């Protein structure tokens, strides 16, 4: 089963799916759906369309340079089947997927960290500006005037009788 990538958005195309366009110079363009095909016909640049992989890679949204991507490269030389090698390869694939997912999560957190601080600062500033909406107008004066009430620890005879 041969899986190919969409020329426009770089998503995988499974057998029997998608559209194939052959230009006059025999260059083949494969598209995963009509959306990609129509954007190609409108001569849109995939690096400028926000939902494509090319845009995300060009603008630092996705990881583009990582050692784990080298395992995904297409190799055209046939290899002799060996059960042990295949077993080891399948184990390695699982480990590589875990490593890749953790690195992607770290990449996303690193990308979003400065924005979180900016949002926090803006929210604190907003609260400081509109503190009157949160607290009642005279509440800060009432806090200082509150009286302490002392509670007696002596038990009366009636209370002891009721407890028994």
Image: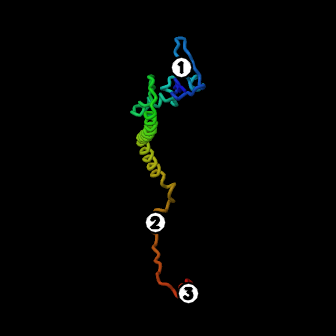
User: Any mark on residue 143, and which?
Assistant: 2
Name the residue beneath numbered marker 1. Answer: 29
Which label's residue is closer to the chain start, 2 or 1?
Answer: 1
Pointer 2 and pointer 1: residues touching (CB < 8 Å)?
no
Looking at the image, is mark 3 or mark 2 nearer the viewer?
A: 3
Number of numbered callouts drawn: 3
Q: State the CA–CA distance, disc 3 to disc 2.
A: 39 Å
Q: Nearer the viewer, mark 2 or mark 1?
A: 1
**Residue drawn at the location 53% of the way across and 13% of the way down:** 26
Res 111 visible: no
The answer to the question of whether label 3 and label 2 lie on touching residues, with beta carbons closer than 8 A, is: no
At 46% across and 39% down in the image, what residue appears? 94
Q: Position of residue 80 (x, y in %)?
A: 44, 26
> Which mark is on residue 140?
none
Splitting the image into 4 quarters, where does residue 107 fall? top left
- In the image, residue 124 sits, relative to residue 27, either above or below, namely below
Instruction: Name the one closer to the observer, 74 or 134.
Output: 74
Which residue is nearer to you in this view: 14 or 40?
Answer: 14
Quarter of the image with the C terminus is bottom right
């Amino acid at each position: 089963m041969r899986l190919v990538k969409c020329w426009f958005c770089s998503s995988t195309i499974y057998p029997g799916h998608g559209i194939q366009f052959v230009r006059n110079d025999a260059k083949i363009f494969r598209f995963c759906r009509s959306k990609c095909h129509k954007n190609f016909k409108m001569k849109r640049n995939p690096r400028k369309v926000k939902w494509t992989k090319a845009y995300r890679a060009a603008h630092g949204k996705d990881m583009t340079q990582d050692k784990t991507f080298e395992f995904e490269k297409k190799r055209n030389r046939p290899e002799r089947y060996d059960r042990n090698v295949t077993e080891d390869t399948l184990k390695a694939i699982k480990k590589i997927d875990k490593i890749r997912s953790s690195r992607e999560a770290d990449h996303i957190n690193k990308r979003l960290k400065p924005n979180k601080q900016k949002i926090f600062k803006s929210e604190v500033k907003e609260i400081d500006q509109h503190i009157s909406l949160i607290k009642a107008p005279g509440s800060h004066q009432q806090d200082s005037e509150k009286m302490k009430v002392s509670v007696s620890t002596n038990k009366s005879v009636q209370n002891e009788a009721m407890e028994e």
